[in-house]
Amino acid sequence: MAGRILQLVLHYDGHDFAGWQVQPAQRTVQGELESVLSRLCDKPVRVAGAGRTDAGVHARGQVASVEIPEHWTDDRLRKAMNSMLPHDLWVARVCGMAPGFHARYSATGRRYSYTVGLDEGSRSPFRRRWEYTFSRALDRDTLHWCAEQVVGLHCFYGFAVRGTAPATDGHQSDVRICRWRDTATGIVLDIEANRFLHHMVRFLVGTMLDVASGKRQRGELTSLLVATDNDEVSPPAPSEGLCLEHVTYPDALYLSA
């Protein structure tokens, strides 16, 4: 008998996970979720995620979709899961969804943040799990200029891991928001798009920081936005600064809030 289709909104500290996707002999977010749900439902349960976050990447708004037997209410399932999940993975919300909902394929937008620590305190063990310590001086005008260039529809071959998308994929992404903001101890990039390619945000951050610190020229970033390969991209910024903040879906898919 078919069950209910649910959306799970997840928070996790990615430091001790080998990423989202199930892998043999590795601790993953998907693996932990499926293990708990299979025990609660007394049968194998499969979970789909909105994005396959890499090892070390965090989330405050990752979304998973799952089909669960009818007798599980939203709140009862959330409380049961949180009582069994490890300390670094938490279900923030459960929502009933319309038939056909899929965490990945139904999404219309995703928003990430990337945190860069610029002060000495960013080297503290209480901060370095969640931000990238950067020691070179930055030109803020250049940094904001870089972010402005990224907004819009581009083919991001220059900012994606080679071979991670099908050969027929145009690597197009519509970036709706890309902006840097100051914090008391550093800077944060907020970036939102309809889709992200593998390592795309981390490549963008690494390149923007190189340009804003004088290691590269502004024109090198604009050249990468029209490049057909990633040969000239800067190394990706480390995974610890990256966090999946929110995934957007059409309102009509929600049956409960």
Image (tube, rainbow, N blue to C red):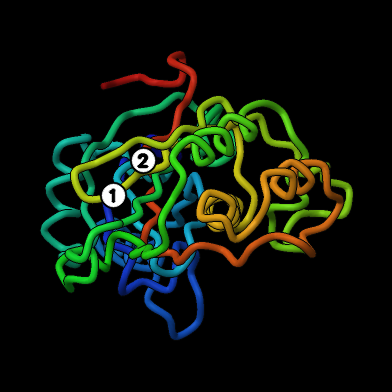
Q: In this view, does 225 lie above or below 135?
A: above
Q: Is residue 124 above or below residue 154?
A: below
Q: Label 1 amino acid? A: Gly
* Residue underneath mark 1: 186
Q: Where is residue 55 in the image (x, y as percent from the top left)?
A: 44, 69
Left or right of 235, for residue 22: left
Q: Which of 99 and 193 is in front in this view?
A: 193
Residue drawn at the location 59% of the way across and 51% of the way down: 211
Q: Is residue 153 above or below residue 142?
A: above
Residue 44 visible to an observer of this rendering: no
Residue drawn at the location 45% of the way across and 28% of the way down: 248
* Residue underneath mark 2: 245
Q: Label 2 amino acid? A: Glu
Q: In this view, does 96 lie above or below 199?
A: above
Q: Position of residue 249 (x, y in %)?
A: 47, 25
Residue 50 visible to an observer of this rendering: yes
Local crowd size for mark 1, using a 10 Å CA cut-off: few (<14), some (14–19), many (≥20): some
Q: Residue 27 carries which label?
A: none
